[in-house]
Image (spheres, rainbow, N blue to C red):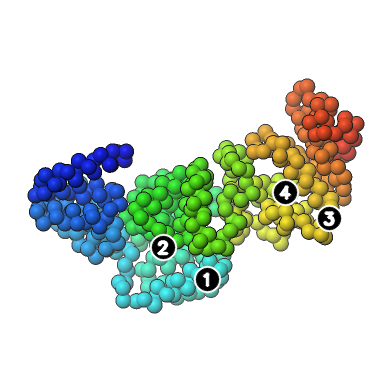
């Protein structure tokens, strides 16, 4: 039934149940429609009416299993799913019924009797949030010793290993989960995150194709899918997951609104993004200033260099310092800033040179980069970069070559203790050097006029910058 015809279908099916209140099939179809609309309680009542009238109809039994799974009434859901398989083991919903049973079994390994283990898991989760990965690992290892089939603990342990840099142990832990509990959604999502950070793009795409076909029953699993899609840059898929949850009445926690804001923003739903982030700030005011649009151009250009995560990652991890300087500068203009800055291994501050730190700290805001003790030459070098950026933003890949040229010259000039005395003229000189090498009819007179300086001044600074060009013998 098409989404845009739900209202009309609801009207006619409701009327049909009023005219034929003893028809179990009409009641079943009305219950299915209510379930699709997220009205699970009403759907369960309607399906129960159908079941009383025709308990021999296997399809009604299956839909009762499904609606109870949606309501998180797992014991009832499992009972109806098992009953369906007894009634019609080769029926059209047999695979779905088995999935419901598998889901319930994998999420209830020890029943409700042990509240203590839940408290321990929450403690481990909090330790991970605080960056105390060694402590979390020790606690989670103890938990899985006592509960060898508690897959949630394994999944958190894999994440802790990964963020501590024990990559092989992280993969091994997920392999252990998936070998014994094939189809564990949290393990598959964690594996996708590992592939993403490790840039294993082929394996990631294959896994994402599989995850796109999964339609879990539990709210927690749909939330995990949405957060994973958003984290790996699949914002359209993430947005669909989160909006479905909202339409079904899911209120969510701080994490939900964080990821909803990101996925909405990167898919052009600015109003939804801002409402979601406002809700997040109500829950966690400390997140103010970390909006995905913070320090980013007002209009997101999805195909710009600033929003190309692979390009950014290549720059900030490049073996050439000038390329890293470029990457650190661009980071401050990108919607991926928060994610890349927060990653535990992408940027190792203690290994950066002063020149790199100038542009990295500018990504956090100029107030972090420049204080009273800052070298004025570094401030002016950053100012030149800003002038060029304002003329070319958002950057396409041709403009990126101009910036690569500038950062090569900037690096060498900084090494030579050059003072960058006239930022506007130096920006004009860079622009002229780049464009005159690529295009005809680029004149010094025209470029000087564009930047509001004289032609002799432009010539002076072109000559000064030429001294920093990297020559080869």
- Label 2 to label 1: alpha-carbon separation: 23 Å
Q: Is residue 193 visible?
A: no
SS for dot 4: helix
Q: Which mark is residue 375?
A: 3
SS for dot 2: helix
Q: Which mark is residue 258?
A: none
Residue pictured at 51% horizontal, 42% vertical: 268
Badge 1 or badge 3: first in the primary sequence = 1
Of badges 3 and 4, the one in the foreground is: 3
Question: Residue under circle 1?
Answer: 127
- Label 2 to label 3: alpha-carbon separation: 53 Å
SS for dot 1: helix
Residue pictured at 71% horizontal, 40% vertical: 389
Q: Give the image location of residue 373, x and y in percent.
A: 82, 60
Q: Give the image location of residue 80, x and y in percent.
A: 19, 59
Evaluate if marks 4 and 2 touch, with contact meaning CB atoms under 8 Å apart.
no
Q: Residues within 10 Å of mark 1 (few under 14, many from 20)?
A: some
């Amino acid at each position: 039934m098409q989404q845009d015809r739900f209202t009309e279908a609801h009207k006619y099916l409701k009327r049909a149940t009023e005219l034929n209140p003893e028809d179990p099939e009409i009641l079943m179809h009305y219950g299915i429609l209510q379930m699709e609309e997220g009205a699970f309680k009403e759907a369960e009542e309607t399906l129960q009416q159908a079941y009383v009238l025709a308990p021999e109809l296997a399809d009604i039994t299956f839909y009762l299993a499904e609606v109870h799974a949606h309501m998180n009434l797992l014991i009832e859901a499992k009972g109806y799913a098992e009953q369906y398989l007894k009634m019609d083991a080769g029926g059209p919903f047999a695979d779905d019924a088995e999935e419901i049973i598998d889901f319930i079994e994998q999420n209830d390994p020890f029943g409700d009797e042990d509240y203590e283990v839940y408290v321990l898991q929450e403690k481990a989760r909090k330790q991970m949030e605080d960056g105390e990965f060694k402590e979390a690992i020790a606690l989670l290892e103890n938990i899985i010793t006592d509960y060898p089939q508690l897959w949630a603990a394994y999944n958190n342990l894999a994440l802790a290993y990964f963020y501590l840099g024990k990559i092989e142990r992280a993969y091994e832990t997920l392999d252990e989960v998936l070998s014994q509990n094939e189809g564990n959604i949290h393990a598959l999502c964690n594996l996708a995150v590992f592939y993403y950070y490790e840039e294993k793009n082929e394996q990631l795409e294959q896994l994402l194709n599989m995850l796109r076909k999964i339609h879990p029953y539990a709210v927690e699993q749909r939330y995990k899918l949405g957060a994973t899609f958003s984290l790996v840059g699949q914002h359209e898929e993430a947005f669909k997951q989160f909006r479905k949850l909202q339409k079904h009445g899911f209120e969510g926690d701080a994490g939900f609104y964080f990821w909803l804001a990101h996925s909405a923003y990167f898919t052009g739903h600015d109003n939804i993004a801002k409402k979601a982030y406002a809700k997040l700030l109500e829950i966690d005011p400390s997140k103010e200033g970390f909006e995905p649009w913070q320090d980013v151009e007002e209009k997101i250009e999805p195909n710009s260099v600033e929003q190309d995560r692979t390009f950014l990652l290549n720059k900030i991890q490049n073996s050439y310092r000038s390329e890293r300087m470029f990457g650190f500068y661009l980071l401050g203009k990108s919607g991926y800033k928060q994610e890349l800055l927060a990653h535990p291994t992408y940027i190792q501050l203690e290994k950066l040179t002063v020149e790199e730190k100038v542009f990295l700290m500018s990504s956090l805001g100029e107030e972090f980069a420049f204080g009273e003790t800052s070298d004025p030459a570094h401030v002016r070098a950053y100012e030149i970069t800003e002038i060029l950026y304002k003329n070319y933003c958002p950057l396409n890949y041709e403009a990126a070559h101009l910036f690569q040229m500038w950062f090569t010259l900037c690096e060498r000039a900084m090494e030579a203790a050059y003072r960058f005395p006239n930022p506007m003229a130096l920006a004009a000189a860079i622009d002229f050097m780049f464009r005159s090498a690529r295009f005809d009819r680029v004149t010094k007179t025209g470029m000087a006029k564009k930047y509001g300086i004289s032609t002799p001044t432009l010539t002076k600074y072109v000559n000064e910058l030429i001294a920093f060009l990297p020559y080869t013998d």
